[in-house]
Image (cartoon, grey):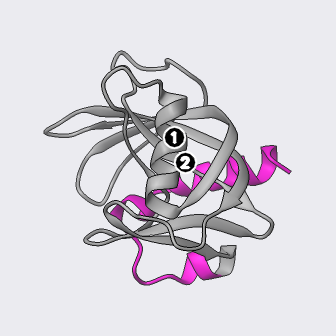
């Protein structure tokens, strides 16, 4: 397990597995690489980040990962599988289930929710990006990217 503080002062615990924490995951994060590029989105206020969000009432985490990815990027994914959990302890404690998957279709002109659509970046572009969301600047994101690179090739 990796433990660190994010840039907002939250105490973060990252574990590679499912149901690792006493707080059940109700948020999702999708870390996906297609060819040599990462699938990202630009949130209108936070900046560039991996797609994700909160599961709706009665929605499975897998379905939330698929829906959030499509709503934020216009990209349809399948074969999603959870590989980690990300617990943030701050004024509001929450747990994110972290998924990866396979890209099925990339819609040209999607209707987007809260974002400016899909952004594709190489490792070098992502590492050099000056407009990353604060979520993307912590140790955990480096470890999540490393896991996907190592296990999804």
Dots 2 and 1: beta carbons under 8 Å?
A: yes
Instruction: Evaluate whether residue 12 shows in this view.
Output: yes
Q: Is residue 100 positioned above or below 103 on the image?
A: above
Dominant secondary structure, magenta: helix
Residue closest to the eye, 45 or 8: 45
Instruction: Identify the residue under disc 1.
Output: 65
Query: Which segment is the magenta one?
Result: 125-153
Query: Is residue 26 found inside the magenta-colored segment of the image?
Result: no
Residue 149 in the magenta stretch? The answer is yes
| Residue 15 visible in rendering | no
- Up the image or down, 53 lies above or below 107; here it is above
Q: Which residue is mark 2?
A: 30
Name the residue: 60% across, 64% down: 39
Residue shown at 41% from the left, 25% from the top: 59
Tell me where residue 51 appears, x and y as whole percent.
47, 55
Residue most extreme to the right: 153
Q: Residue 103: percent from the left, percent from the top?
A: 71, 53
């Amino acid at each position: 397990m990796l433990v660190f503080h994010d840039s907002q002062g939250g105490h973060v615990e990252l574990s590679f597995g499912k149901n690792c924490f006493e707080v059940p995951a109700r948020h999702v994060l999708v870390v996906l690489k297609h060819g040599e590029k990462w699938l990202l989105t630009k949130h209108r206020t936070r900046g560039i980040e991996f797609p994700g969000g909160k599961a709706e009432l009665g929605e499975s985490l897998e379905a939330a990962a698929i829906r959030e990815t499509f709503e934020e990027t216009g990209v349809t994914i399948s074969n999603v599988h959870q590989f980690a959990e990300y617990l943030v302890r701050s004024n509001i404690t929450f747990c994110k289930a972290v998924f990866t998957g396979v890209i099925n279709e990339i819609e040209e002109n999607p209707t987007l929710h809260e974002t400016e659509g899909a952004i594709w970046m190489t490792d070098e572009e992502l590492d050099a990006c000056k407009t990353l969301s604060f979520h993307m600047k912590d140790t955990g994101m480096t470890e999540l990217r490393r896991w996907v690179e190592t296990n999804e090739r």
